Image (spheres, rainbow, N blue to C red):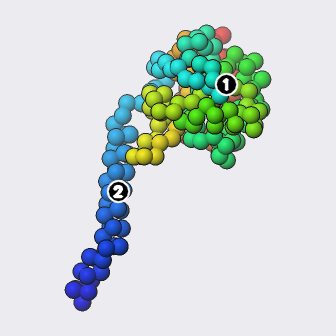
Amino acid sequence: MNRDRTAALRHPGWTFTITTGVLVAMTLFGFLSRGAHAEELAVGDAAPGFELMDQNSETQRLADYRGEWVVLYFYPKDDTPGCTTEACNFRDDIHQLQDMGAQVLGVSLDSMESHKEFAEKYHLPYPLLADREGKVARKYGALFDFGPVEFAKRHTFIIDPEGQIARIYRDVKPKTHSDEVIATLSELKGGENG
């Protein structure tokens, strides 16, 4: 009986499955523990600077928005359901956000060409930045990096006119996020006057 069980465990398919499972578990544990020890940005920190190309092949620099509020939102992939919902809600609220003195900037690891198609398809009136190598996402702690799989996590940073992080969202719900950002900006800007 024991011999049959040992033989089953030595079957090439089982060996591959067990080995793969162990490697995935070890990699995932390593990824999670790295994330747990990585320093995360906090409210009050200086927002890391960046220079990225948008869907119109124009260079966008964070420094160019000094003196304005910036809604910097990272998202996983162009033209996917959650990302489209989030992007279109920012589009629908863009005049309200602009009236509050805020510039919306979307960032993912997609190419400029992909961003252009996405922006044109949904009439997105704000820059989508191509962070092809994930360098900016990494600076903001918004890069999901699991071996060959990399994408931006759905995180948002509200940056104040002085270039400091005023609010961080790491648990974003695409359907309600634009409303949440507007409410936060209203609260933060209320503090400007007080």
Residue 82, position as x, y percentages in the image: 65, 45
Q: Mark 1 or mark 2: which is in front? A: 1
- Residue 33 in view of the camera: yes
Q: Is residue 161 above or below residue 117?
A: above
Q: Is residue 47 above or below residue 181?
A: above
Closest to the observer, 105 or 170:
105
Q: Is residue 92 left or right of residue 167?
A: right
* Three-letter amino acid code at the position of disc 2: Ala
Residue 125, position as x, y percentages in the image: 74, 27
Q: Is residue 96 left or right of residue 106?
A: right
- Which element carries disc 2, helix, strand or loop? helix
Q: Would you identify the image quadrant in which residue 70 lies?
A: top right
| Pointer 1 residue | 56
- The N terminus: image quadrant: bottom left
Do the residues under discs 1 and 2 have CB atoms within 8 angstroms?
no
Residue 101, position as x, y percentages in the image: 69, 16
State the residue at coordinates (53%, 20%): 51
Q: Is residue 156 above or below residue 70?
A: below
Question: Dot 2: within a 10 Å radius of its alpha carbon, few (fewer than 14), some, or many (20 or more) residues?
Answer: few
Q: CA distance from mark 1 to mark 2?
A: 41 Å
- Residue 179 in view of the camera: no
Circle number at residue 25:
2
Q: Is residue 182 left or right of residue 153?
A: right
State the residue at coordinates (78%, 23%): 95
- The C terminus: image quadrant: top right
State the residue at coordinates (51%, 17%): 164
Q: Is residue 2 above or below residue 33?
A: below
- Which element carries disc 1, helix, strand or loop? loop
Q: Residue furthest left?
A: 3
Q: Is residue 166 left or right of residue 33?
A: right
* Three-letter amino acid code at the position of disc 1: Asn
State the residue at coordinates (30%, 70%): 15
